[in-house]
Amino acid sequence: MRQTKESNKTFVGFPANVLLRVILVTSALIVPIASGAARANEGQDLAPFKMIRSLQYIQDSVVLGDHSASEMQRFILGEIDRRLRTADQALFRDPRNVDAALVYVMSGGNPETLDLLTDRDVEGNFDTRVSDALRQYLRGKGPLIVEQLSKAAPEYRNSRIGPYLFLILGNATSQQDPVAAMQYYDWARLTAPGSIIEEAALRRSVALAAQAGNPEKGFRYALNYARRYLTSPYASQFADVFVELAVVHFGEAAERRVDEVLGFMDPPRQREIFLRIARRAAIAGRQPLALLASQRAEELVGVGGSQSQLLASFYQGLAAVPSADVFAAAQTIAAIPEERLSQRDRALRQAAKAIADAVVRPPEDVSPAQASPATAEVHFRKEGAPEPEETGSGMSPFAVPAEADVPNQAAAPADPAFDGFLADRHSRIKEIDALLEEEGP
């Protein structure tokens, strides 16, 4: 049926098509389309387990590419929070409502609401092993819950909260035991296919496989992710860990697997991956890989325009600095306008130029005032004010759309393990960038 202008009108700030989908998921959820006191009264009478179904549907829609649903996600989280806080304790005699409360806090909800509910629970409706573990986890104490939750979680393996608990177990164990964490993630994603749980489990498994030195498994996870979730607002994180996997474990076999994963991406995403690989490899001193990735990116410049062409040439020049073509590389780098580069790439350009100048400069006596290794280490560890992470092209198709502004993801309102892994990888690159900024001609 043809849409009319009337059908595209929004209600209380939300697209009409999003509201319609929510209503179809659970016809009882009429809170978003009511108004005033009537809306509040109906929200107070609605069972939490019915409201949580709509939240799950909305969150799954977001990771499947419907970024317009993110505003509704925030709204429903707020409505569920109000409902749980005002609920009579008799309501939690129904295990479905207990599960709903736990899913709510594991889906980006307010952790203080769980504190409130468990403090009021005089009838023992909440399993204290689970609720206490979640309260610790949501306060950033993930490693402390592993023993307790690993004993309780198997009892909930086939329950409504099972996938969430196993995802959290994976998060909590990822730094100490990546292999065990991947097993927890496997169970979480296999019991919740097509959901935000599967998206998170696959994405984090790619990172853990790289950390555990199992590239073949990492590429299998990456392939499954690329088939399903490239339009997820979290796909930029996937691109980061996939590039790390490709650079650290690159070889003939890995090159085939990279091409297999990229086969599910459109040309702009392929170009972005190659640009990120080229930059990461150039920083790591992986000259052959940096050259190869730059050349592959150049082959795709028709879909990225002049900026992609410029960056591909830039990274190719960086990779050639320590080679016999240092003169040509220096000319290539010097010819690139500084205003066309990001702040981080300007530091790379300055450092590469300094290195190239040093290579072609006639030998000089070593100065006794030359920086010692200890001084260099101080510079290497120097970290300036954090900058927004910039992607290779500056026009990344993996970037989160500005209008999405997706709130905390399912089972990850506080994910110290995975966030720590990403922060470690990003901080290493930023440390190198900081070091490069200290060097000059």
Image (spheres, rainbow, N blue to C red):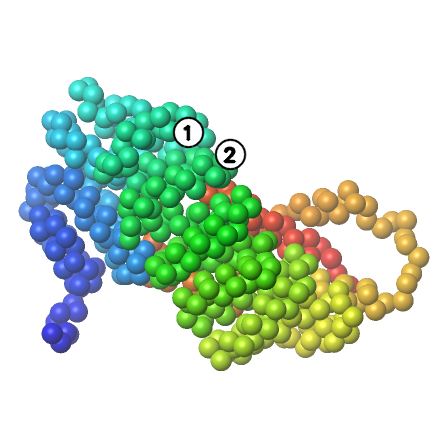
View extreme (right): residue? 365
Relative to the observer, which residue lies in front, 228 or 118? 228
Whole-percent x, y for residue 128 in the image: 28, 23
| CA neighbours of label 1 inside 10 A, class few (<14), some (14 to 19), many (20+) | some
Q: Is residue 153 above or below residue 192?
A: above
Question: In the image, what residue type sits under mark 2?
Answer: Gln
Left or right for 111, reference 124: right
View extreme (top): residue? 122
Q: Is residue 130 above or below residue 309?
A: above
Relative to the observer, which residue lies in front, 378 or 184? 184
Residue beneath label 1, please?
Answer: 146
Q: Is residue 271 above or below residue 413?
A: below
Asked which quadrant contains residue 17, the reply is: bottom left
Residue in the image at 49% along x and 45% along y:
208
Quadrant occupied by the C terminus? bottom right
Asked which quadrant contains residue 328, the reply is: bottom right
Left or right for 108, reference 174: left
Would residue 414 be visible to someone looking at this image? no
> Which badge, 1 or 2, comes first in the chain's sequence?
1
Left or right for 90, reference 234: left
Which mark, residue 176? 2
Label 2, secondary structure: give it.
Answer: loop
Which mark, residue 122? none
The Cα atoms of the two marked residues, 1 and 2, are separated by 10 Å
